[in-house]
Image (tube, grey):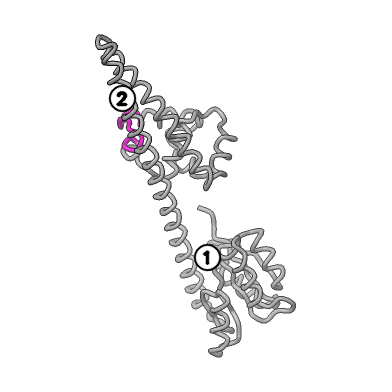
Amino acid sequence: MPKNLILIVDDNPHAVSLVSIVLSRKMDCELAVAFDGSTAIKQAREKNPDLILMDWQMPGIDGIRAIEILKEDPATASIPVIMITCYSEKDYLEKAFNAGVIDFIRKPFDNLELLVRVKSVLTTRDYYNQMIEAQKRESVALSMQNVQSEEFRHKCIAALKQLKSLYKTEPENTVANIDKIIGDLDTELSSSSWNQIEKRIKDTDQQFFKSLSEKHPNLTPSEMKLCLYLRMNLSTKEIASATYQTYDSVRIARTRLRKKLNLTNDDNLVGYISSF
């Protein structure tokens, strides 16, 4: 699991050093430093830190203005910011929170308070990210289920109409016609549904498909589809239900996929796919 990246912003090198020492000794995290608002904005955009500890008073762009700029940018708006400053009056607190600060620590800070507040914000951020990811997976799963259900209904209706027509003219071939329709339904349902599903998913998760196909260009559409389900952390039983397959067929497909991805039995298949 990657370490949290914390950006410390203060024009006072001594203050930066104090914060850095406390965090590096007590937390397993990575640290980045900026000594003014402009550099803080640039680093936030480039490094996308998990948390920013921002001083208020700085030359040029001060802490409040830097926060306002970050919150106006969709790429950095969700980064939580803790303000560390000597200001303590109510008006300053209100201004800081209105700018988008999530917490406020007064200088000189207590080491324990700093650690507790930082860990609390990071925990909340992790929980928020997990909720967003869960909602995304749920939305994708529902979209796929809706597409497949609609496609299945249309194909069934068309197949029944075709069968009715054929029965009137070729009643002796009813069984053969039924087998052909079933085969066509299986093939077309798989390909047509996946094309629609793939389009929807790629619209919101283009990098996953791009990275996966670049690393493993030999994957078939069915295997790409299976990778998607696995990345959503669906179980073999859930995948079987969503794709109208048996449990054993999905289990075998997972085994084949593992070999195609050059993974051993000791490698985590879901973890590997999720890394893209």
| x 53%, y 81%: residue | 110
Q: Mark 2 highlights which residue?
A: 161
Using the rendered view, name the quadrant where residue 182 is placed.
top left
- Residue 235 place in picture, x, y as percent: 35, 41
How many discs mark residues in the rendered view? 2
The front one of 136 and 203 is 203
178 above or below 194? above
- Residue 44 place in picture, x, y as percent: 64, 63
Q: For the magenta stretch, what is the residue range?
A: 240-251
SS label for mark 2: helix
| x 51%, y 71%: residue | 118
Q: Amino acid at mark 2?
A: Lys
Mark closest to the chain's N terminus, 1 or 2: 1
Image mark for residue 27: 1
273 above or below 128? above
The front one of 88 and 136 is 136
128 sits to left or right of 83: left
Q: Amino acid at mark 1?
A: Met
- Magenta-drawn stretch contains 249: yes
| x 30%, y 19%: residue | 165
The front one of 66 and 16 is 66
